[in-house]
Image: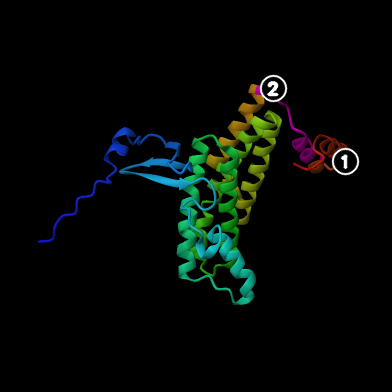
């Protein structure tokens, strides 16, 4: 009979000292003996460990920082000969999942700028897949989550803006995020579902809460949109000038 291998490197102590909470997200930043800071996420029956920079699993696919970067390079190098085969689809799926986990972790850790970065990576990869994949069904399996990723991004961007620039900037981030989400619904001929969508409703409620709590009226961006919609172009020009004075670099 084969001898049973005794492995003293089990995770019993780690799991016992950090119980799994099925009702919430348990995340922590830890530093190892090499002084490298990593994210740890408690999951049922285990712990996920993610790098804080680059690809979450710490690898460099084909020598690139991320698989998305590699795909962009290949598409540029091969041009019309670039093919989105099954292997590429599998690797994209892996990267989607990794960035989802880290984005959720950054939100739980209240590192909103990092959450925005990871959401942008996912959205960029979705754009690439939509443009280059010939498997429409596979593309749709990812596109259906675009509003959810945009929801996370908008939340994170608004909270980051609230910390750095104040409530009006946070409201503008939410308004911008809602516009991007509306474009998604319109692209897939589902605009009639937009107003009743749960994620849209939650963002609208957050925006209204910010208005009431901080006593903020309509932002300059909202005033500009209304002026353009009502064809008050002289008013719109004055508002643009004021926006430029407030934000000369076009934040």
What element does badge 2 sit on?
A: loop
Residue nearest the viewer, comparing 78 with 86 = 78
Residue 124's place in the image compared with 41, above or below, is below
Q: Is residue 243 above or below residue 191?
A: above
Between 187 and 161, the residue placed more toward the observer is: 161
Residue drawn at the location 54% of the way across and 52% of the way down: 54
The first of marks 1 and 2 along the sequence is 2
* Left or right: residue 111 compared with residue 217: left
Q: Residue at x 46, y 53 (%)?
A: 57
What are the residue bounds of the magenta stretch?
Answer: 214-227
71 is within the stretch colored magenta:
no
Task: Tell me, yes or no, if residue 190 can be seen here.
Answer: no
Give the quadrant of residue 217. Answer: top right
Quadrant in the picture for the C terminus: top right
The crowding category of the residue bearing disc 2, from other C-alpha atoms within 10 Å (few below 14, some 14 to 19, many at least 20), is few
Q: Which residue is mark 1?
A: 237
Q: CA distance from mark 1 to mark 2?
A: 26 Å
In the picture of the structure, the residue carrying the numbered disc 2 is 215
Q: Residue at 50% x, 35% y: name it.
A: 109
Q: Position of residue 89 (x, y in %)?
A: 48, 65
Residue 96 versus residue 18: which sits nearer the camera?
18
Image quadrant in which you'd find residue 174: top right
Residue 118 at what x, y percent from top left? Answer: 56, 48
């Amino acid at each position: 009979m084969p001898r049973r291998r005794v492995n003293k490197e089990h995770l019993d102590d780690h799991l016992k000292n950090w119980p799994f909470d099925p009702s919430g997200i348990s995340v922590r930043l830890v530093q190892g003996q090499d002084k490298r800071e990593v994210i740890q996420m408690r999951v049922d029956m285990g712990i996920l460990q993610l790098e804080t920079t680059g690809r979450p699993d710490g690898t460099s696919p084909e020598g690139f920082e991320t698989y998305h970067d590699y795909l962009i390079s290949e598409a540029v190098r091969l041009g019309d000969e670039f093919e989105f085969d099954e292997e590429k689809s599998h690797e994209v799926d892996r990267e989607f999942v990794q960035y989802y986990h880290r984005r959720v972790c950054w939100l739980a850790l209240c590192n909103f700028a990092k959450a925005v970065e990871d959401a942008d990576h996912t959205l960029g990869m979705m754009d690439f897949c939509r443009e280059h994949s010939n498997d429409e069904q596979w593309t749709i399996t990812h596109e259906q989550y675009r509003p959810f990723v945009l929801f996370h991004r908008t939340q994170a961007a608004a909270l980051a803006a609230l910390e750095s620039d104040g409530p009006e900037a946070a409201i503008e981030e939410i308004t911008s995020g809602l516009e991007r989400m509306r474009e998604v619904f319109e692209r897939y001929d589902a605009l009639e579902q937009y107003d009743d969508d749960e994620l849209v409703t939650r963002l609208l409620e957050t925006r209204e809460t910010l208005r009431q709590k901080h006593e903020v009226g309509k932002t300059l961006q909202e005033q500009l949109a209304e002026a353009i919609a009502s064809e008050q172009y002289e008013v719109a020009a004055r508002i643009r000038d004021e926006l430029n004075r407030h934000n000369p670099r076009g934040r």
